[in-house]
Amino acid sequence: DWTPDSFIESTVRELQDKLGNDKVVLGLSGGVDSSVAAMLLHKAIGKNLVCIFVDMGLLRKNEFEDVLRSYESMGLNVIGVRAGDKFLSDLKGVTEPENKRKIIGRDFIEVFDAEAQKLTDVKWLAQGTIYPDVIESVSVNGPSATIKSHHNVGGLPEKMHLKIVEPLRLLFKDEVRRVGRQLNIPMEILGRHPFPGPGLGIRILGEVTAEKVRVLQEADKIFIDNLKEAGLYDKVWQAGVMLLPVQSVGVMGDERTYENCVALRAVTSTDGMTADWVHLPYEFLAKVSNEIINRVKGINRVVYDISSKPPATIEWE
Ligand code: XMP
């Protein structure tokens, strides 16, 4: 019978046999999969695992610092790389969603590769690939792969002659979480909503700028903090805020305003392939809307997305 304990025990043994005294590099994203893969490898080979966590400047507010601290407290050997400026300057003037994805994916690979190449004697690249990813990448011509391109670590294996190790290849998401719980990974990481690889870059519709990132981070933090306070965070599969390329007229005191609009999105889902919008309580939505409009300079209107997938997608880009 499959249990987290038996999986951990046999996987650690297999990893030790396979890797011996070799050095392994792994890219951490702050998400569940890469974190669980890292902890399994850490248990198997300890300091021979080197993790790289890239800040694209497109994470949630304070997320890079918070997650980096969690990783360090888990005993991981982790290098944090701040590269936000590079991403922002390369995204300048770019508005088309797939172009944004390609640039963010390419930059991520460049930053990761440059950092990995500073390491000496690395033999393996570890990835947090799980079973649904394996299936998805087999059907490269299937609809999911062509609707939106997802990014992954690119040409590094060939360049550095790295072999690939993927300890979660046969697991489903819920099994990954169970293994993570058994490995004592903090709930802050394990219970985290899915977050797209390109981050806030695809939640800012149209061109991405530093100011828009800041505005969206503030609004997003208010939404997510309120979900947590109201005990709703764990009942929702994924939530976030979209910054729309729309300005509308408002009024503040005696002044007419002409500012941005954000859309709140919260969905239930099992795998992201289909999703339903969540019937969040009106009082809750009212509170979030008030806080965002009162506290985030530059936003004067909040709407709630009541579209399901299909035909809408979870992200707006
Ligand atoms: P959509 O918007 O396609 O999203 O309904 C389904 C799930 O995938 C996430 N998503 C991405 N994840 N790179 C990622 O790693 C991407 O380019 C990307 N686009 C969407 C989305 O957040 C949701 O969980």
Image (spheres, rainbow, N blue to C red):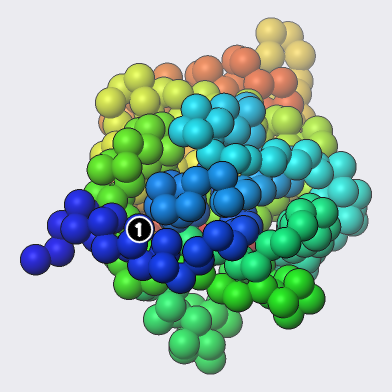
What residue does disc 1 label?
12
Residue 90, horizontal then vertical, whole percent: 88, 55
User: Where 297 falls versus 209 (above or below)?
Assistant: above
Q: Going 65% across and 68% down the picture, which residue do you hit?
A: 123
Counting other residues with Cα less than 10 Å from the Cα at mark 1, is it few (<14), some (14-19), or many (20 or more)?
A: some
Question: In this view, which residue lies farthest toward the left?
Answer: 1
Instruction: Out of 265 and 306, give the one closest to the viewer.
Output: 265
Q: Position of residue 160 (x, y in %)?
A: 76, 72
Q: Is residue 36 left or right of residue 259?
A: left
Residue 220 located left or right of residue 81: left
Taking the spot 80% from the left edge, 33% from the top edge, the residue there is: 211
**Residue 187: x, y in percent?**
35, 33
Give the vertical position of 288 relative to 248 (above or below). Answer: above
Label 1 sits on what residue type? Val
- Disc 1 secondary structure class: helix
In-front residue for pair 197/215: 197
